[in-house]
Each structure stands twice: as structure tokens, then as C-alpha cells.
Image (spheres, coloured by chain):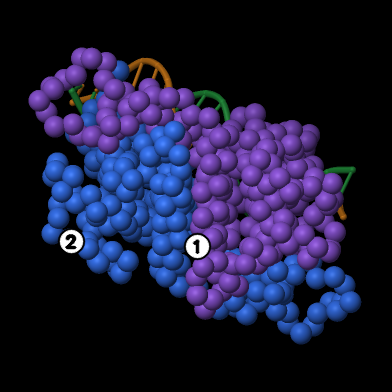
Chain colours: A blue, B purple, C green, D orange
Amino acid sequence: MRKLKTDRQPEIVAAALSVAAERGLDALSMRLVADRIGVTPMALYGYFRSKEDLLDAMAGHLVSEFAAHNPAHNPAHDPAHDPAHDPAHGDGSAYDGDWRGRLSALAHGMRDVAKRYPAVFPLLLERPSVTPDAVRVVDVAFQALLDAGVPPAHVPRIERLLSTFLLGFATSEVRGRFAAGTGKTRAHRAYGDESEDDPAAPDPFPAHRRLAPVLARPVDWDAEFEADLEDLAAVIAAAIARPAE
Amino acid sequence: MRKLKTDRQPEIVAAALSVAAERGLDALSMRLVADRIGVTPMALYGYFRSKEDLLDAMAGHLVSEFAAHNPAHNPAHDPAHDPAHDPAHGDGSAYDGDWRGRLSALAHGMRDVAKRYPAVFPLLLERPSVTPDAVRVVDVAFQALLDAGVPPAHVPRIERLLSTFLLGFATSEVRGRFAAGTGKTRAHRAYGDESEDDPAAPDPFPAHRRLAPVLARPVDWDAEFEADLEDLAAVIAAAIARPAE
DNA sequence: ACCTGAACACCGTTCAAGT
DNA sequence: ACCTGAACACCGTTCAAGT
């Protein structure tokens, strides 16, 4: 058996995504996926050559939803954005000025997907995806950066910089990497519970102590994401200012 | 048995790191680690409560090497950096101006660790680490950002932005996410092998086509990393310019 | 053409027992 | 105190066989 069957692939991917959502990615097994669609584990191997292949297909499905539905996001820094515009039509030059809106929509789409598939999303940083859907997403980003005036020689690099940050942010958020360094956990050492061990000993984390009031505050992750996007606009500006070659 | 033994923990972590390096993280098992140090799998459970705990300890070991040895990196954009300085001594205010050098050293240290432990490094984006070593690394970054003049209210956010990018970059690099979109793979669609399917059909990836000459060039990842660090300096500048609260 | 059953070589972890 | 042996409930995947 060389050629794979395709008809039930979407059904299998959907089953795998729901198993991962319910029991976690680590608990995902060919056996559980097979159970879910009422079939023997070995039947899956007619559709995917291995579990690795199935994981790739799952990652590809997430990418395909990046640009799918644009839920109401806060377009505060993008007042010119017109939701009636269909980004799929070919005439790109008509709204060159909308590159901020297109990048913003992509960024929010990615974060939304991460929230919808928290268990599976981290796969995207580890699995290179070159499906047509993935290339299409990158193409939209390329075009937006070209429209912004980034020199062509720097466009792929800036796209990698931005997508790396965005994937990393969403992954950190859903996996709790950010939260771990926040609030009581991190402030604790500097804030102290009054029972400081040895007040004469040099503080091992002086900057944490200095930032204790800030670190004790709860973090609004939506606001942090928006602030990050605004600051990253400076990266694009820096790339635009670079010598063209 | 409530309390864990600690004496052989470093030996076990080292064995686990070498098993992961040789056979990959997916093939890492308690049984193989136990074999490596000539012991029964169950003996490990006296030192780590679970495989998850062992993975956390492995991640912690990588973090502890971020600042360890500063291999010769290109200090091109940091001519004032003096390698004779020992960042460990307490007198920090004497070289406030060296914040660029300290951030750069941290960034390069992280990427070096990624290259030394490619199989294990991706754990760092998925496992929140709050070991003393990890907090120390964050503290160095906090201090550098404070010295740079970033308003305290924005320092933790900017630290998260930068560390997210750096972890993501190194992960993408060692896992091949970057390379997958490069050279022949990505340029192929736009470049074409002359045997274009239908020249009348609308190009599904117009920006790729426009960037084909750039995409066909091999990428110097060291140079890309340096360029990214330079452009990210603009993020720090943007944060400095923000209203303090 | 599509699926099943049995089998192989593995897992993490528990528990009681050994020295 | 530290480690072992046997056992339990799982894995991914191969291969030959069923309908």
C-alpha cells in the first residue's frame, strides 16, 4: 500500500483534535483516535503513514484557520480598516495603505486559534509547515510588508521575526510560561513575606526587588498583546529605514 | 517516600540529556536513562517524582547555562563591551551604559545553548521555569532594561517580548521551521520549473513570486540573528518613549 | 478496497520485597 | 537507605488474514 486514502482524513484530524483537547496532547494516541471514529487503530494507517503525519495534518488544520473568520478584535490602532473588504480578491494594490490592518488581522487570527486549540498550538513552532494554507498565510504577510515599504531583501527576515514572536507569544500564553513569572510567584522573592532570611545578605535578584510593585500587579494579556504589536511596528519602521541591499 | 534524594540528580539529568541528544526527545524514556547509569528504572523515582519532573530538571539545566560561558560572539554593535568584566560581581551601577552588551550576551548565550542541546531546547517554550537560575537570568534582563531607561511599568512586558522572540528564534532554527520556508522549497512555487501549469491562472502566491530572487538566496542565520537583534533595539527605543505609566 | 486480530517491542508507574 | 522484580495498563507499528 503506497497511496494513502484521503476521504476520511478530515474526519480523523477532527477526531484527533478533539481527543487532544479533552485529554491533552501527551495522551493523544492512535488507539484513542481510532476508538473515537469507531474503527481499529490499524485502519488509520490507510490515511496517515504514521502518528507524526497525523500530527502534521493537525498542525496544518490550525494554520488553515488563521485567516478563516475574523472575530471582532479591537482595531483601535487601525481606524482605516474596513471589514467589508475581502482579502481573498486579487486586486491588492487598491488598499496598500491597509497593510497594518492585514498584519493585525493575521496576528489576532493566530492568537485566536491558539486559544481555541491550546493543547495543539505548540506544535506549530516545532513542525515546519509548508502546506498551501501555510504558504498562503506567509504570502499575505509578505505582501503587507512589501506594501509597508520594507525593502524586498528584508521582507522574509521580518516575516520570520514577526511570526516567530507571534507563535512564541501564543504558545507561552497557552502553556502558562508567562503566568509563571507573574504575580505572587515572581514578586514573592523580592516582596518578601516579612520573614526575610538575612537582611544583611546581598539581594540575589535586585531588579525584581526594584520592580516588585509592578510585578505584583495582575497582567492584562490582551492589553499586553496590543502593546507588543504597537512596539513591533517600530521593528518594521527600522527595517524600512535600512539600506535596500 | 515523600522526600526526594538529591545526590544523584545531576548524574541522572546528564544521562537524560545525553540520551535525548543521541536518540531524540521522543525516544527519551525512564528505562533508557536508567540503563545509562546502570540502574533499574524504578530507582529514578527516588530522585524525580515523575518523568515530567525529570524533563523540568533538564530544562532548568539548559537555563543555568545561558549565562555560563560567554563564547566569542561578534560584538560588532557593542564596541564598548569589555569581556574582562565579570557580570557576577555586585557593583552593577558602574557600567549602566553596558546594557546593550549584557542583553546581547544573554541573547547569544541562549542561542548557543539551543545549538548545544537542539533536541531539548524546545522544552523551554512549553515548560514554565521558575528555578533560581531562571529568575537570575530574568533579573539580568530586567536590570539591563531599567538601565536602558525603559519605564519600570513596561520592563516585564518588554522582557517577555524579547525572551519570547529569542526562545522562538532558537527553537525555530534548531527544529527546521525557518529552513522549511527557504530556498528551493519556498521559492519553487514562484520561481517555477518553467513547466508552469497554467500561465493564465491567477498566481495564488503573488508576493512569493515578487520575492523569488530573494527567496532563492541561501540564508546566513548568524547574520539574520544579528539583524533581528539590531531591529529589536527599536522596540526598546519605542518602550523608552512610552508614557511612564 | 477497506478493515481487523494477533503479535512485537516497547512505555510510565505501582507495589511489595530484597539487602 | 537504597534499590530490584514482577505486574498493570498502556503505546506505535508490522504482518497476514478477513470480507
Query: What type is the residue that disc 1 sits on?
Result: Ala
Q: Secondary structure at mark 2?
A: loop
User: Which mark identifies residue A188?
Assistant: none
| Residue at horizontal 59 percent and vertical 50 percent from the top | B124
User: Which mark identifies residue B238?
Assistant: 1
| Residue at horizontal 51 percent and vertical 57 percent from the top | B235
Position of residue B35 relative to residue A164, above or below, is above
Name the outermost residue toward the bottom: A194
* Label 1 crowd bin: few (<14), some (14–19), many (20+), radius 10 Å: some
Disc 2 to disc 1, how far (Cα)?
27 Å
Q: Are callouts 2 and 1 both on one chain? A: no
| Residue at horizontal 29 percent and vertical 22 percent from the top | B191
Query: What type is the residue that disc 2 sits on?
Result: Asp
| Residue at horizontal 52 percent and vertical 44 percent from the top | B228
Kindly tell me whether residue A5 is visible in this rendering.
Answer: yes
* Dot in front, 2 or 1: 1
Q: Callout 2: residue from which chain?
A: A
* Left/right of residue A161 with respect to residue B43 in the rendered view: left
Q: Callout 1: residue from which chain?
A: B
Position of residue B200 relative to residue D10, above or below, is above
Q: Which residue is mark 2?
A: A82
* Left/right of residue B88 with respect to residue A119 in the rendered view: right
Image coordinates for residue A137, horizontal then vertical, percent: 29, 43
